[in-house]
Image: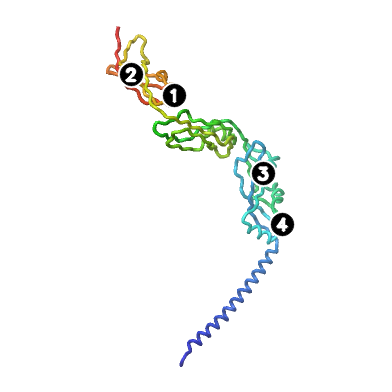
Amino acid sequence: MNINIDKISQFLKIEKLKNNKQVIAFLVCLLIATTLWFLNALGKDYSTSILYPVKYMNPPKSQFLSNEPPSKLELKVDAHGFTLLRYKLSLSFSPIVLNLNNITQNVESEKGKYYIPTSGLLRRVSSQISNEITVRGILPDILVIELDSLKSKNIPIKPDINLGFKSQFNLKNPINLSPDRVKITGPSNIIDTIQFVSTKTLEFADLDHTVERFVDIVHPDKTSINPEKTTLKVEVEKFTEKEVKIPVHIINKPQRVKIKLFPSEVKVNCIVGLSRFDNITPEDFRAFVDYNDITEDTKNLKVTVEQKTSLAQLQRHNPEVVEFLIETN
């Protein structure tokens, strides 16, 4: 028996097409039925919950919100199905605004804490959302609102600066800030712990000239400052080395003892700005040895040099030790 393969294949394609049409017809009918059921369901009223953002505004004068109450409220609502669907599909809502001055006005506080029943906020909340939705309840049942008093005080500003200078250059004067103080305002428990604020960190490298610029002032969270910027001035000048001779004194020497030092003077080398070179004198330094360092085996005494001025930078002194001779009567 000869079987015509082409006829069989054609027959199977026709049968498959018939079956596909039946499947498509079934799916279309199912889709129509589902749509009709869905539209019918949306036409009914429902009770459900909606999470709604909330914003807390306008605390009483000289107070601020010091805790973090819920950022969203769970609203128990009744509404038409279409209305609920529209809200459910919304990507964002305009937040409900709660006026802190109003909602705490007739509530007794416990050390700054106000416990607000949300049942008393139904009217406020309802007035800020669609009139197509009826608000039946709000969760949480209680809002804890904590208010703290604001406090202000004036404090100094400290520069936070890393300085690098070119060879033979350095500060001409201490770093200057104008203004050098700010008024800081915030919670009393924070303000009481703050003694100063700092500038934003700045770095300068290879300085060989004076720099002046505005810089931001850093302050703790939950505080405000006035002003928020200060003018920073870094005065730079060329430095050179200067040498002066100063006498060596003896400290802790008994009055009856006579002692001679060899040598009795030391040379002091310091770094000083060119503008102040002539102002540095031997009186700006003090050299001394300590009589209490003398023992039977002591042959010389260490010389200590102190600097009395901020206009120069002490580098070294020579000699670092001196010999001594105690005179006897």
**Disc 3 on helix, strand or loop?**
strand
The residue that disc 4 covers is 132
The C terminus: image quadrant = top left
Pointer 2: residues within 10 angstroms few (<14), some, or many (20+)? few
Which residue is painted at 29% across and 13% down in the image? 325
What is the number of callouts on the image? 4
Q: Disc 1 marks which amino acid?
A: Arg
The residue that disc 1 covers is 276
- Of labels 3 and 1, earlier in sequence is 3
Q: In the image, which disc is placed on residue 293?
A: 2
**Residue 208 position in % (x across, y down):** 44, 33
| Residue 195 seen from this side | no
Q: CA distance from mark 4 to mark 1?
A: 82 Å
Q: 231 or 305: nearer the eye?
A: 231
Question: Would you say the residues marked 1 and 2 are in contact, meaning their CB atoms lie under 8 Å apart?
Answer: no
Tell me where residue 41 sits by quadrant: bottom right
The mark lying in front, picked from 1 and 2, is: 1
The residue that disc 3 covers is 116
Question: Would you say the residues marked 4 and 2 are in contact, meaning their CB atoms lie under 8 Å apart?
Answer: no
